[in-house]
Amino acid sequence: MKKIGIMTTGGDCSGLNSVINRVVLGAYNRGWRTFGIIDGTDGLCHMPANAIELTPESLPIENARLAGSFLHNGNSGVMNFETAVKMGRIATFNKNLKKSLAGMGLDALILIGGNGSFSLAYKNNDIYNNLSLVCIPKTIDFDIPLTDRTIGFDTAVNELVKYCDQVLLTARSHHRWFVVQTMGRECGRLALNAGVAVGADAIIVPEIKFNIHDLVEHIKCATRDYGIIMVSEGITIRGHSGRPADMISRALSAAGINNRAAFPDYIQRAGDTTAADRITAAKMVTCALDAIENGETNVMTALRGGECMTVPLAEFYAAGDVSPDPNIPDLCTSNAYIEPDDPLLDVAAAMNIYIGEMK
Ligand code: F6P
């Protein structure tokens, strides 16, 4: 009988509980025991680790659909990689994690995380070398290379669509434009997908250069006097400062266009998990449990063309744009962005959505 651990790290999103739920059920089906580590590496660095055994009976029925993490994701105020590096205590911190894992007697660990957590796991691999480490990608930003999907992305797009559908009614009532700022860090995939889904008139993302005068002209020439301008949080405009949606809103106001900036904020990480995210969770968990059964380690699950497979963490790291992580000193993370040949860009252009200076 195998003993597996599971933890959620980094920012939360909808779908984490679906993954936890599927892991517990799938592991139980194989005759394995599952231990949930509370608060990610914050809980793991305690001695003994802060963990609980999870069984199908102990999982609340609503657990597979609710956002957030039943196991919690950690608290940036306590000891974690970031604070350990800042305090010069990373060696002790890593040693504690390794000891804690050994104390739990785990055969495998499923780490549900984003590109920061995976890059950390890859760079500090020694911590996990006595067990099988399998990572499951989650993030609303969808900025992880080599996978067609990340857990939480589909729900985040859906939450933005619901938000914009409501805001559009006010937009129409008041002949007003809404500049909706999405999350996503430096990756515009969330804004692009949500923008196409709601039929925005413009989508501004960090990967594509845009011109504020062209945007203003595009809105002035629109067939309606209301609508959505979707703006990713990672954009910058030379000579302007403040939140991206505010910057664009001010430029529109200066041109006499009635508008408001709107910030859906953390609802993008909330909302009941969509069926698509739950199916991705089920596929990735099955693939992760198979990988553990086959003795694989240091891998990430990846969805490609509907199929789920494992990819070595080394390949994940090499495939992305590796750059310093703004949140974790001394760490370079591997990042994915909108590719220039993303078919959705052509679709957006064909729908007369302003997306900047394409290709
Ligand atoms: O990476 C997910 C994400 O929601 C980003 O889109 C956003 O910029 C960031 O996390 C917000 O993080 P925090 O929870 O620290 O405010």
Image: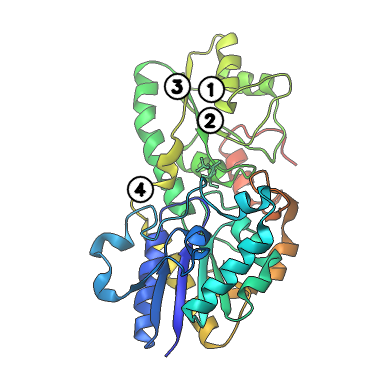
Of badges 4 and 2, the one in the foreground is: 4
Tags 3 and 4 in contact by the CB under 8 Å rule?
no
Q: Is mark 2 within 8 Å of ligand 1?
A: no
Q: Position of residue 19 (x, y in %)?
A: 41, 66
Tell me where residue 143 appears, x and y as whole percent: 61, 52
**Residue drawn at (47%, 43%) of the image:** 197
Circle 4 sits on which residue? 271
- Going from N to C along the chain, the mark reached first, 3 or 4, is 3
Q: Which quarter of the image is occupied by the N terminus?
A: bottom left
Label 3, label 4: how many angstroms apart (C-alpha)? 27 Å
- Tags 2 and 1 touching, CB below 8 Å: yes
Q: Under tag 4, what secondary structure?
A: loop
Q: Earlier in the sequence, mark 4 or mark 2?
A: 2
- The CA span between labels 2 and 1 is 8 Å
The answer to whether the residue labelled 4 contacts the one labelled 1, judged by CB atoms less than 8 Å apart, is: no
Mark 2 residue type: Asp
Q: Nearer the viewer, residue 332 or 205?
A: 332
User: What residue is disc 3 on?
Assistant: 226
- Disc sitting over residue 201 in the figure: 2
Decide if ligand 1 comes within 8 Å of the CB at mark 1: no
For the residue marked with disc 4, what is the amino acid? Answer: Gly
Q: Is residue 211 left or right of residue 153?
A: right
Q: Nearer the N terminus, badge 4 or badge 1?
A: 1
For disc 1, the marked residue is 222
Q: CA–CA distance between discs 3 and 1?
A: 9 Å
Element assignment for label 3: loop
Callout 3 touching callout 1 (CB < 8 Å): no
